[in-house]
Image: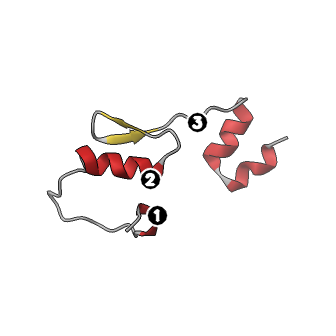
Amino acid sequence: MKLSEQKCRDLPSGTPALAGEALEKCLEEVGGGWNVVDGQRLSRTFPFPDFVTALAFGFGWWASPLLP
């Protein structure tokens, strides 16, 4: 089953994090410049042309009127 077809759910305490081939497979499905940092968390850089555009992205739909 593809990652996009799955639902989020709580995992039992002590469930190991994804690693190796399983992690690489999920990362390929997510795509778009995501990287694994320290084998523990995902990271991605979102470049913006100016502060206002970055602010609108960070604050979501309600900040869109700030855009030129």
Between circles 1 and 3, the one closer to the viewer is: 1
Q: Nearer the viewer, residue 28 or 39?
A: 28
Task: Say above or below: 59 vs 47.
Answer: below
Which secondary structure, mark 2? helix
| Residue nearer the viewer, 61 or 27 | 27
Label 2 or label 3, whichever lies nearer to me, is 2
Q: Are marks 2 and 1 in contact (CB under 8 Å)?
A: yes
Give the percent coordinates (x, y) of residue 24: 33, 45
Question: Farthest residue toward the left?
Answer: 14
* Crowdedness near tag 2: few (<14), some (14–19) or many (≥20) residues, C-alpha within 10 Å: few
Q: CA distance from mark 2 to mark 3?
A: 19 Å
Q: Which residue is denoted by mark 1 in the rendering?
A: 4
- Mark 3, residue position: 46
Mark 2 = which residue? 29
- The outermost residue toward the right is 68
Q: Is residue 47 above or below residue 14?
A: above
Q: Secondary structure at mark 3?
A: loop
Specify the farthest residue to the top.
50
